[in-house]
Structure formats: C-alpha cells, structure tokens
Image (spheres, grey):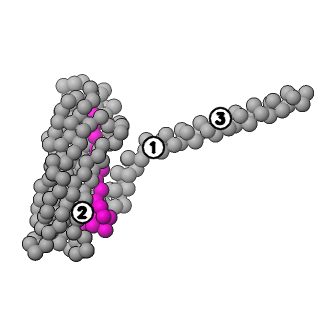
Amino acid sequence: MEVNTAAADSARRNRRFLVRALVVSGAMFLFGFACVPIYRIMCVHVFQNRIDNTADSATGFAVDTSRWVTVQFVGNVNSQLDWSFAPEQVEMRVHPGAVNDAWYDATNKAQSAIVGNAVPSIAPSQGSPYFNKIECFCFTEQVLKPGESRRMPVKFIVDPKLPKTIDTLTLSYTFYNNRAATRKLAEQPQAAISPNS
C-alpha cells in the first residue's frame, strides 16, 4: 500500500512539474514573440524624442561649418529574417545642421514575399536626442518579393547642439520579420502585392 501511495505522490509531483514547465515555456515563447512590437510601441510612446525625431523638430537649424561629426552606419538582420541588409557607406563626415543622405540596400533571399520592419538605434545614447531623421525607411513596413532588392534612403540632420564631447555617432538598424503582416500578405492574391517605393 505504501509503495502505491509513494508512486501516486511521485506521479502527482511529476505532473505538477510538467505543467509548470509547460506554462513557463509558453510564457517565454510568447514574450519572445512580443518583444519587437513591444519595443516599437515603447519607441513611439516613451522614447520618441530620443529615437524617432522627425522633420518637425529638425527644421530651422543653422549649419555649423566649423565642426565635423562622423556618422557611422550599421545594418543587421534578425535571425528570423532571410534578407541581406547593409549600408552603402560605412561612415561619413557631416556638419551639424546640414541635411544629409545615406543609403541602405536590402535583398529578400527567401522564396516568398516578406514584410520587414527596421528598428533604429543611435550610439552613444547621449547623442540620440541630437540625431534627427527627416526621411527613413524605418517609418514604414518594407515589402520585398522573393529575390527583390531595394535601395532605401535615410535623410538626417545632426543637431548643432550635439555636445562637443561627442564627435562620432553610430546609426544602427536591425530588420525584423513582421510575421503578422507577412502572414496577411501571403493570404492575398499575388496581383495585390505591391512593393513600397
């Protein structure tokens, strides 16, 4: 009788452990899946002035021709996205207050159309409020058909109020697969899929 009771207790403990492990695994999966949308929401609502400064805040700067700032460019692709993505230029020297153009190239290496979103970041973080994107592919979803390549612009201004102690800024983008939008796209007839310009 004691053996059966011990076996039953052991089986109950094992079941409880299995249920807890499955709940924790499921929660981790959902958290990982939700990270990109949560990050984008945080960027828009909390860190908007630090990451996504737009033309409204970038107008009216006087160009400071007495000073140079080096802007470095980095492009990364999340492991869930079968794209190649890289800047055309590794770095450029700019005058604070001047409007500048940089370009990134992306190619869809997958066998199906994919919707991607680029998430920007600026380093060092103290320089982020002084980097103003006027035009950027990161403002919208990018749709690339299988094998399609696209040259994507970034128009930006470095605020002349950038502290003198910062002479280099790094603009980095990471492209992510927007799975929900990609799924919707796959459900559409092929004729309805039109890439962004």
Residue nearest the observer in this picture, 164 or 188: 164
Residue 85: name its quadrant: top left
Residue 183 quadrant: top left
Q: How crowded is the residue under tag 1: few (<14 C-alpha within 10 Å), some, or many (20+)?
A: few
Secondary structure type for disc 1: helix
Q: Does the magenta stretch include residue 147?
A: no
Q: Between marks 1 and 2, how big is the CA–CA gap?
A: 29 Å
Q: Which residue is the site of mark 2? A: 169
Q: Is residue 107 above or below residue 90?
A: above
| Residue 19 on image: x %, y % | 64, 36
Per the image, the residue denoted by label 3 is 18
x, y percent for residue 20 = 64, 40
- Left or right, 174 with respect to 107, comes to right
Chain part drawn in magenta: 113-130
Residue in front for this viewpoint, 150 or 143: 150
What residue is shown at x 61% (from left), y 38% (from top)? 21
Ranked by sequence position, the earlier of labels 3 and 1 is 3
Q: What residue type is labelled 2?
A: Leu
Establish if 158 lies above or below 35. Answer: below
